Each structure stands twice: as C-alpha cells, then as structure tokens.
Image (spheres, rainbow, N blue to C red):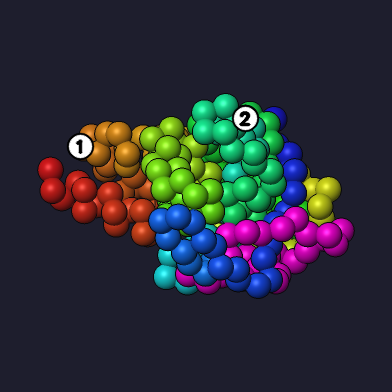
Amino acid sequence: MKNISISSINILGKPELLVSEHQKAYSAYCKKAISADSIELGMTGFTGDIIVDTKHHGGNDKAICCYNSDHFKKWKAELGFDLESAAFGENLTLSGQNANEEHIFIGDRYQLGEAIVEVSEPRGPCYMIGIRYNYKQFPVHLQQTGLTGYYFRTIKTGLVKKTDKLIHLSSHPEKISVMNVNFVRYHDPENKEWLQRLVDLKELTLEWRERFEKMLSKL
C-alpha cells in the first residue's frame, strides 16, 4: 500500500518577520500545527492558512505543501539543525518511506479525509528557508539532494481530521516521481528525452512545464 502517515497539519493565520544575518522578509513560513480536531480543505488550501508571497505561492496547484519528517535526521546530522513539524513551512508534515520524493509520483491521487488531492509539482526551495535557519545555502542543499518536498492540488474539497492519512487512490501511468523531476531540473538539464516527457506531462503544473519547454528550446 502507498498510504502515507501524517504527523501534523500546519497553518499560519498571521505573517511574521523573519530575520537572518543576510536578509529579512515577512513570511507565512512559520506555520503551527492545528489544535482543532479537524480543518476544512478548500480548492486553494486549508481554511485559515495565509499566503504572503502570492506571486510564487498559493492557488490550486499549490494548495498543500508537504515535507517528510524522515529527512530531519539527515539535516540534523549534516547541518546541525533541530527540526520539528512545519520545519519547511509545509502544511502536511509526513512520515514514512511512502512519503519520500522518489515514491511520490506526479498525477497520483490520494484521499485526504473527505477531500481528494493530486500530486502537482516538486516544491522549489526558495530563499525563505535560508532566512529561517540563518543559512543562505540551505535551499541549494535541498535542490542538490532532491529532498525538496512537493505540492498537492485539490481535486475535491472537504473536511480533514488530524487523525486522517493520505490514502492512495490511483497511480499515474507515466510514474514520474518528484525526484525524477528534480533530477532533470538540477542535474540533467540537457536531457532532451526527459525534458520532452516532462513538457508532455499535463498533470505537472504549467509553471514547471513551461520552464522545461524553455530549457528544451535552447538545446
């Protein structure tokens, strides 16, 4: 089974100022686990969750940001960071091998409480992660390893309980994982065959498909 355990559901109702030695910015990054037993998932995200940078975040394609807490040990060992739920500003802190980027496939669908969600794109780690941990290169580490996290789009809205899991409903026939997409973008940008596969993958968000189409056109 490809079901995935959820450690916490996280939102932020008020933006905060993040300050590091190299930069500062207002952000909705520092989310907190919900205290209520359940929360409503709409087409663009969980009720009460705030988006500050609407140019790069929000919308149906980025309704839910996810990260696997199993990766926290790696970052603790390599970089010394003590991480906990919502460490990467994610809405769903997940756990278990089924939540790893190599096991999450673009276009796969999951039941989430009453809702249905679909894997839409890898998370593109941004500078805000570097500010949050006062380590400018942190986003680059995420890109290089492919341990970026990923997004779900909402297919069907509904109530989600804290005790719910992500129940795997269907597999996309292409079986292109988040890790596959990250590898092409960050390590194999001149692979024409793979670039074309990603351009043709309609379940991948338009933003990412257009990026790969531009990369392909330059070859």
Tell me where the magenta segment starts and ends, as one range.
28-53
Q: Are marks 1 and 2 in contact (CB under 8 Å)?
A: no
Residue sitting nearer the eye, 49 or 26:
26
Instruction: Report which residue position mark 2 lands on.
Output: 73
Q: Residue at x 65, y 55 (%)?
A: 91
33 within the magenta span? yes
Q: Is residue 155 visible?
A: no
Separation of marks 1 and 2 at Cα, in angstroms? 33 Å
What is the number of the mark on residue 190?
A: 1
- Of callouts 1 and 2, which one flags the residue occurring earlier in the amino acid sequence? 2
What is the number of the mark on residue 100?
A: none
Q: Residue at x 73, y 39 (%)?
A: 5
Q: Could you tell me residue 79's position as x and y percent?
A: 52, 33
Residue found farthest to the left = 219
The correct choice, above or below, for 83 with respect to 97 in the image is below
Dot 2 falls on a residue whose secondary structure is: helix
Residue sitting nearer the eye, 47 or 78:
78
Dot 1 falls on a residue whose secondary structure is: loop
Chief secondary structure of the magenta portion: loop
Q: Amino acid at mark 1?
A: Glu
Tag nearer the camera, 1 or 2: 2
Total numbered circles: 2
Q: Residue at x 42, y 37 (%)?
A: 141
